[in-house]
Structure formats: C-alpha cells, structure tokens
Amino acid sequence: MKIQNKEYRTIWYDDNVVKIIDQTKLPHQFIIKDLTTVKDAINAIKIMEVRGAPLIGGTAAYGVVLAVKENNNYELMWKFGLINYFNNTIFVPNCSVFFF
C-alpha cells in the first residue's frame, strides 16, 4: 500500500525487528508497531493488530523467527527447513529475511 507516496507492506522485517501496521487503528490512524519478541507476535494476533489469514500466518512465521532469535536456537530453524545456510537467509511465507 502507498501512504504519503511511500510503499508499505502490512508486515516486514527491518533491523532485527518485525514491523506491522496496526490494523486496529485503521482507517483513522496509521501506526507502525514493532514486534521484538515472540510474545509480541502472539499478542498482535490475539488482539487483532494483524487481520486476515495471510497476515496472521506471516506474523506467526515471523514469531518463529523471533523465538529462535530469543533462544539462539538456530538448529530449530534448520530442523524445520526454514534456514538456508547456503545463502544465509531465513524463509518465511512471502519473504526472505537476511539473518547473518
């Protein structure tokens, strides 16, 4: 979506932080919220800051990334096939997150 001539996605990863557009504030306010922990991702889904199956799924996938980062458990990502050591990226639906 384009807001004041700037392109935005409903969810994105920037500087080790997952960013979302808070859907509970639309259409009257445009608020970008940072998700830094898996609990933040769970809460965003729970209180409907993210809405719609694709965005909920993307938030859950990013939640896995945040959980792994919180626990420094990269083996978990390898186990689920989400990490690709050949090009140093983590894959989540509809995006790749550069990780290393």
Image (cartoon, helix red, strand yellow):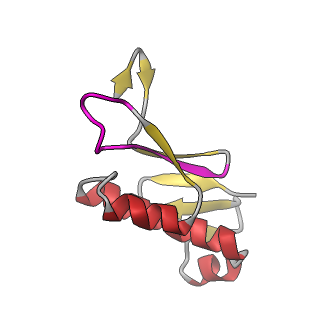
Q: Where is residue 69 in the image (x, y as percent from the top left)?
A: 67, 68
Q: Quadrant of residue 90?
A: bottom right
Quadrant of image for the C terminus? bottom right
Query: Residue at the location (59% across, 65% down)?
Result: 66
Magenta-colored span: 16-30
Residue 7 inside the magenta-drawn segment = no
In depth, the one of 26 and 63 nearer the eye is 26
Residue at 59% over, 57% down = 36
Asked whether residue 28 is drawn in magenta, I would say yes
Give the residue at x 41% y 35%.
31
- 99 to the left or right of 17: right
Q: Magenta region's main secondary structure?
A: loop
Residue depicted at x 25% and y 60%: 53
Measured as percent of width and height from the top left, residue 16 is found at: 66, 52
| Above or below, comparing residue 62 to residue 18 in the picture | below
- Determine whether, in the image, residue 76 is placed left or right of residue 57: right
